Image (spheres, rainbow, N blue to C red):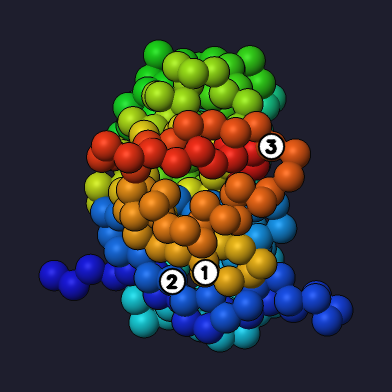
Amino acid sequence: MSIDYLEIQGLRVEFDGFVAVDGVDLTVMQGDLRFLIGPNGAGKTTLIDAITGLVPATGSAYYGTHNLLRRKSHEIARLGVCRTFQTAQVFEELSVLQNLDMAAGSGRKARTLLRRRRSVPDIVQEALETIALTDHADQGAGSLAHGQKQWLEIGMLLVQNAQVLLLDEPVAGMSAQEREDTGQLLRRIGQERTVIVVEHDMDFMRSFANSVTVLHAGKVLSEGTVAQVQADPQVQAVYLGHAGTEPVHVTDGADRSETVNKGRP
């Protein structure tokens, strides 16, 4: 059985003469939990926006045989390429189960969503278990903890059969335990999917990334394992020169270490 993967070549995004993404090449295979990092303004979110049809771009972004560029966002989502935003996009007035029902396109009319189901569709039940919200199925989404709302949004992508998940700062504002739980969730869903995480939390990245791509000024600066990227002199120069950030001690996984900036890379 063939495995589809995300392959981006020469992707370029320009706004009124300003080049936000400049000829990016990026290949992410199924099962590779890829983190996308870089200083503010590096083009990380713009790259995700281009892949999901929110901004026009040139080049190519293939998932399987489908070039995602120049397609509408809903068409891209139907192909299984979905994203989250920095603020969770959930229906706070509905329960967790109702949110998943809505996302699954179950065909239930709006008024029937308010009735308790006698049974839960398998795809919804599986998503509840994956995002660890089974015990909160009937709880209003608006009353969930911050981290749980992010998990619910991920669950809403899973019931749509998302095969490529593009997650924009999924642990922003989370507690330490929520970050750990989110990392474990990403590992679970990433085993059979293609997952790209735009992230500024370097501790989270070091704990959970399988591979890392560093963007700088709209271009790919470095790519590889966490250890390889941290040991790259170009990456060290970019972060050490990024003013207004708090230095942290970063190990490359061996006996040597470098001081780089945590900041918001």
**Residue at 80%, 76% in the rendered image:** 18
Instruction: Name which residue type carries label 3.
Output: Thr
Residue appearing at x 45%, y 17% in the figure: 177
Category of crowding for the residue at label 2, using alpha-carbon neighbours closer than 10 angstroms: few (below 14), some (14–19), many (at least 20): some
Question: What amino acid type should be assigned to the residue bearing mark 2?
Answer: Leu
Single out the mark in the foreground, 1 or 2: 1
Seen in the image, is 133 located left or right of residue 109? left
Residues 23 and 236: in front is 236
Q: Position of residue 249 (x, y in %)?
A: 48, 32
Would residue 200 be visible to someone looking at this image? Answer: yes
In this picture, residue 208 sits left or right of residue 198: left
Secondary element type, mark 3: loop
Apparent side of residue 197 relative to residue 188 in the rendered image (left or right): right
Towards the viewer: 2 or 203: 203
Where disc 2 sits, the SS reads strand
Instruction: Name the residue located 48 percent from the left edge and 49 percent from the top edge.
Output: 197
The relative height of residue 91 versus residue 237 in the rendered view (above or below) is above
**Which residue matches tag 3?**
245
**Residue at position x 66%, y 51% in the image:** 241
Marks 1/3: CA–CA distance: 22 Å
Crowd rating for badge 3 (residues with CA inside 10 Å; few <14, some 14–19, many 20+): some
Q: Is residue 72 visible?
A: no
